[in-house]
Structures are given as structure tokens and as C-alpha cells.
Image (cartoon, coloured by chain):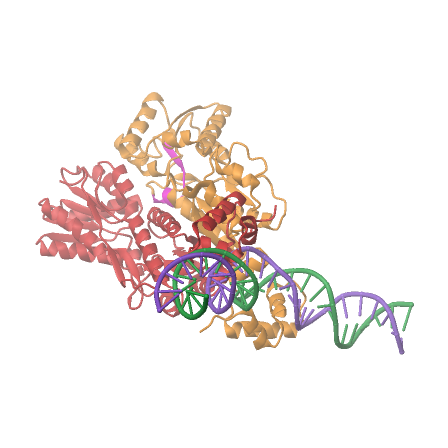
Chain colours: A red, B orange, C green, D purple
DNA sequence: CTAGGTCCTCGAAGCGCTTCGACGCGAAGG
DNA sequence: CCTTCGCGTCGAAGCGCTTCGAGGACCTAG
């Protein structure tokens, strides 16, 4: 069973190969009757254009590269959500997604770009001083970054507005009348890595607390139960009257509640707790946590949209910040 | 800056285009001096073969399709781990990975296969009665499944030996002298979906317990703290003297320990707890959990290896089961 | 009645690569 | 000495598609 080619379709429909091509691409006007005849042939033969041939002739692969961080550092579920939303959105634009990991480094990008395997690139988890950024600037292929490098000049970046997320938390607690609040953050290494989002959250949190005139403290925190317990205890000890805790560390969310339970503090009667995390984690906790959502799907969607615009050589904004969303549940009052 | 083609390289090295091709593919003998001259030109011009042209001429895209389940049901981190190991392994075989989600269904598979976008397919999370399986049988492209459909005849399947994982748990607890043990499982919906792995674990667990002559109970369990708490309590109530619990539900691991703490049972003094989960979750718990590892990376690696073998038309076993690994930590005695 | 459009369709020239058959050359064999 | 046989290299024929320039058919305007 040889695979069906465009010339099989042409023969079957009694037209020229180029006519079939124009019917399929819509790049020239074709009479309704011819168009229909061609489409019928396409259907009855089960024709699918050969991707390689198409890419070769048109210089468009209709594939975009998605580069995931290899270091499974943080936030795997969010990553997955993001990846699937990228694939889904790309398909809406009739594109496919080539999955790459960061461990091939800049060379990997150069390889797929130079070989015309992909038309554009989507990079996740960009760091402040990312070695891939200079390369992206000189590459002919357009790219979109998730996250912000030190100098975003000439690039296209998308991210959640983490500073705003921090502010949202502080404001919510302040609105409820809390006067002493604290943020339990990501592991220290996350702050040091320079991805920037952890710092930005913290800064937004502290800044909002200050402008509301309330007392705010913060600590990074590892993810094991014991360390979470210690950190919670420390926070409680060093801030007498602490009545609001923000958790910006997905893996620690459950442990924080466990620790408070052991320490005899009721949530939300004695202390209000909120988290910056996906909704399912917040909902699964007991009590269900008031939370600020990281809209991974929106980020993926927007990133693809921007990349597609660049592929059409449309101008796009250099930076796009997505608004976080606060959902009030049972853990704050 | 036009992109450099194979004929640029040929000109630069003073040889024929075909010679360059043979140097690069190694499919014909080329003298050492010519080879070196060509390789030098390749390097100094920065030549990267055009993927589309190569695919068109050779009928090999050097790309494999990886189909992830869209329903983010379970186990996102494991999924990610798996995906990255697939990409990494594929790169070792000089292949790239096209990411697809299951929501395009069988049509998506047909599309990428018929368009020669991919040379082979890797499907994750195959269900007992998977609508994609019949299609795979008639497709010219080879495929490898993660998981087992009802009838694996004529397919190539890889999976963890879940029955063995269940047995490992029961045996470990029996070896420690426990006489009444229980398994706290995945949410009920997972059992009903027919992916099979949850049932197989349970069957292995019960069978091993029976053959060791000890008492075993089991319950599915949702993932919220409250439901986990209820389930643990129920288990404890209905089996007086219960001294060993196996958790086969990643999201519930932390909650089980929290519930036991509240119920006044010490781990491992009063009750031994073990989990079937990734190592990082087990290590992060307090106390660190004895666990059986789902070797996601091995699965990815093996799956790619098998697919590559099929691409070379080598014969491969119909089913490959990967051995689970027991790691003894602090939570059992 | 003819010049000039418009609307559709066609043929052919690539896109950059792989692969097949052919060929020149020096070495080995009769 | 001439034939035979590798070995290393070359040229050319596609792979299946897009796209450009051309041109036939038909219509409108002069």
C-alpha cells in the first residue's frame, strides 16, 4: 500500500498537481466545482500531505520547539499543564510541537533552528542570566520566553505577574484585619538560582504589606516535613501575634497545615493560611485553602499566540504579564 | 545570510554533493583524507542538514511521536520524568520527539503517521479498551505502548510490574512480622477507568499476603485530607491490630502520615507505613518512607530502545515488565 | 469587432537531500 | 601483458510539495 501523494489526488480529480495544492492552501482562487472535486478525491483517497516535502518546498515546518527545563526543580504539575496547553493551542494554529529539554543547551536550539526542524521556539523557565538568550537574539527563528532574563530587550517574554500575586496575598490578609503576617517561601536554592519569580513574589508581598502599614516577615523553606515544621515554629516564635501565613511552596502546603495542627493552631480561627499554588492542591487541603492561582494554561496559550504572531511577522509586545487570580476558600478569615 | 546547504559544503571541500552525503551518513567507504576535508568544511561553514529535505529523500524523519494522556489524572511528576527520559534517550539515538496529547484521539495518530512527520509512536497511559489500539495495528509505523490493553497481541508493551510491586510490599511487611496489613489505594475512579495498573498492584498485594498467610484489607481513597483521614480511621477500626499500611496514592502519602499523627499512632512504632511512589515524595515525608519506586526513567528509556529496534526492523518482545525497587527507610520496622 | 481584463487552471522549476548505477584507477591474478 | 576486482568518487534521478509565470476562456468596454 503505497502512500497517497498529491499527484494521486490530482489524477483522481482530473486536475493538475498545482491545482490541488492551491485548493488545499487557499492561496489562489479555485472554482467551487473544481474545489469540491479535489476535496472529494482527498477524502476518498485518504490523502495527507507529506510533512517533509511541504517543509522543504515552503520553508515552513509548521512545528514549534518547546524547551522544558530538565532540572525537575519545581512545580512539575504546572509544567505539564503548561506543556499540554501549548500543544493544544499550537494545534489550533495547525502546528505541532517538538519537545526538547534544556540539557542540550544552546547547541540544541541551534541544531533544530538551523536544520529547519522548527519554525520557532518556546523556552520555559528562563533564568536571569541565561546562556541561551544571546543565541536567541541572533537566530533567524522567532522565539518566546516564559520568564524574564536580565535584559529582555529585543525578546518576547511572557510570565505571571508574581509581584502582583505577592501583593494580592498581603492585601487580602490586610483586608481581613491581620496586622502581622509572614511568607513561607520556596527552598533557598530557588531564590539563589535567579529565576526571579520567587524574589518578585516576595518583593510584591513585602511592598504591599509596608504600604498597608502591617508587619511582614518571610523565610525560605525546604520541602521536607521536618523543615517545614521548624520554619513554621520559627515564624510563630519570632512574630508573636502572627495571624496570617502565605505559602509560596507547593510541596510544603500540606506540611504547613500538618505542622499547625500539631502546634495546636486552628485554621482559620487562630491563623489564616493562604497559598500561591494550583487550584487542585488548594482544594485538596483541609481546610480548603484560599489561594492565588498560577494560570499555567493561560501562559501556554499566550506564549503560542505570540509566537504565531511573530511567525506571521506581526509586531508583538516585548513583555506580557498575566494577572494572578485570588480564590477565597475556607482557610482565611 | 542564506542557510548553508550540502552543495555549499561540497563546493567548499571540492567534492561532489553525494560524497558529502556519504561522509555524513557513513553508508559508503570514503578515504580518510576526503572525509577529513569534508568534515572540516562542515565545521567551518556551520552546516546543518535540512530536516525536511532529509526526511523527503530518505523517508525517515528521525522524529518519534510521544502521546501523553490529556486527562492529567494521576501522577504528573512521574509523567514529566518519563517525558524527559524519552527525549534524552531519543536524542542518544539521534532522534527528536514530537509531543502530542491524547485529545486529538486516533485521528491525531493517523495524521502524524500518514504525513510522515514521525517514524514511530510512543503511547502513554494506554487503557484496557483503548480506541487507538486497533489503529496502531494497521499503521505502517511501529509503535510502543506504556501500559497494557486487553489484547496485546501484535503490539509492543512496556510497563512496571505492578503486581510485583504489590507483592514486594506485602512480603516486606510479612518479613517484619506484621500479621494484619492494609492497602490504601488510588481514588475509586482510577480503578474503574481500566488502566489496569491499580488493579494489578492490588491483586499482587492480596495474593502475596494470602500466600504468606497474613490478613490483608484494601480500600480505594480520594485525595483530600478529610477523605484520607476517614479512610485511615476506617481501616484502623475495621482491622483491630492493623500494624502495616501500604499507600498506593501519591497525593495521599502526606495526608496518611498526618492522619496517623492525629490519631495518636506513631510511625513506625505503632504502625509501619510504606508507599508506592517516587523517591522524592518518600524522602520528603516524616519519617522518611520505605517505598517501592516506579522507575519512570527506565520505562521511558526502555520504550525508546524498543521503538528504535522496531525502526530497524529488529524483532522485539511483545511485553516488557520492569522490576520495581524496594527502598527501606525509617517508616517500617 | 477587437483590445484589455478577469478568472481559473496548468506546466515546470526548484526546495536540499539520499541513493543508485557508473566509472576511473591501481592492485592482484592468470 | 591483459583481465578482473575492489575502492573511492561522481552525476543524475528522484522524494512530494509549493509557487511562479503563462495562457485559455470568457466577458466587458471602446
Is residue B85 something that shows in the picture?
Answer: no
User: In the rendered structure, which segment of residues is drawn in magenta?
Assistant: B272-284
Quadrant of the image containing the C terminus of chain B: top left
Residue A146, position in %: x, y? Answer: 32, 57
Foreground pick, A43 / A267: A43
Number of marks present in the image shown: 0
Q: Position of residue B87 (x, y in %)?
A: 47, 53
Picture quadrant where residue C8 is located: bottom left
Q: Quadrant of the N terminus of chain B?
A: bottom left
Front one among A292 and A298: A298
Query: Going by the image, does B275 lie left or right of A302?
Result: right
User: Does A24 sit above or below residue C13?
Assistant: above
Q: Is residue A189 toward the left or the right of residue B322 in the image?
A: left
Taking the spot 61% from the left edge, 43% from the top edge, the residue there is B316
Point out residue B71 in the picture as x, y percentages from the top left corner. 38, 40
The residue drawn where x is 8% and y is 54% is A213
- Note whether C21 is above or below B154 in the view shown: below
Q: Is residue A318 above or below residue A41?
A: below
Image x and y of residue B320, in percent: 55, 40
Q: Nearer the viewer, residue A313 or A164?
A: A313
Is residue A268 found inside the magenta-colored segment of the image? no
The foreground one among D21 and A215 is D21
Amino acid at each position: 500500500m503505497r502512500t497517497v501523494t498529491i499527484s494521486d489526488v490530482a489524477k483522481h480529480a482530473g486536475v493538475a498537481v498545482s491545482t490541488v495544492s492551491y485548493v488545499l492552501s487557499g492561496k489562489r482562487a479555485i472554482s467551487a466545482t473544481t474545489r469540491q472535486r479535489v476535496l472529494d478525491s482527498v477524502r476518498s483517497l485518504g490523502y495527507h500531505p507529506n510533512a517533509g516535502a511541504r517543509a522543504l518546498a515552503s520553508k515552513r515546518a509548521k512545528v514549534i520547539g518547546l524547551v522544558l527545563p530538565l532540572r525537575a526543580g519545581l512545580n512539575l504539575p504546572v509544567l505539564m499543564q503548561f506543556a499540554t496547553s501549548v500543544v493544544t493551542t499550537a494545534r489550533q494554529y495547525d502546528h505541532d510541537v517538538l519537545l526538547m529539554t534544556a540539557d542540550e543547551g544552546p547547541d540544541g536550539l541551534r541544531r533544530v533552528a538551523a536544520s529547519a526542524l522548527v519554525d520557532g521556539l518556546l523556552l520555559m523557565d528562563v533564568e536571569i542570566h541565561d546562556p541561551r538568550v544571546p543565541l536567541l537574539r541572533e537566530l533567524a527563528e522567532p522565539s518566546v520566553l516564559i520568564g524574564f532574563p536580565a535584559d529582555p530587550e529585543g525578546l518576547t517574554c511572557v510570565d505571571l505577574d508574581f509581584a502582583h500575586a505577592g501583593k494580592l496575598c498581603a492585601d487580602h490578609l490586610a483586608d481581613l484585619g491581620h496586622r502581622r503576617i509572614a511568607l513561607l517561601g520556596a527552598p533557598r536554592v530557588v531564590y539563589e538560582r535567579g529565576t526571579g519569580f520567587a524574589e518578585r513574589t516576595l518583593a510584591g508581598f513585602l511592598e504591599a504589606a509596608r504600604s498597608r502599614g502591617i508587619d511582614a516577615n518571610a523565610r525560605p523553606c525546604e520541602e521536607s516535613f521536618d523543615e517545614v515544621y521548624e520554619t513554621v515554629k520559627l515564624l510563630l516564635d519570632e512574630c508573636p501575634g502572627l495571624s496570617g501565613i502565605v505559602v509560596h511552596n507547593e510541596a510544603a502546603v500540606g506540611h504547613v497545615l500538618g505542622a499547625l495542627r500539631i502546634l495546636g493552631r486552628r485554621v482559620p480561627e487562630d491563623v489564616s493560611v493562604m497559598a500561591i499554588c494550583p487550584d487542585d492542591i488548594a482544594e485538596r487541603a483541609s481546610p480548603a485553602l484560599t489561594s492565588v492561582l498560577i494560570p499555567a494554561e493561560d501562559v501556554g496559550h499566550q506564549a503560542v499566540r505570540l509566537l504565531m504572531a511573530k511567525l506571521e511577522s506581526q509586531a508583538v509586545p516585548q513583555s506580557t504579564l498575566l494577572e494572578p487570580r485570588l480564590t477565597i476558600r475556607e482557610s482565611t478569615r
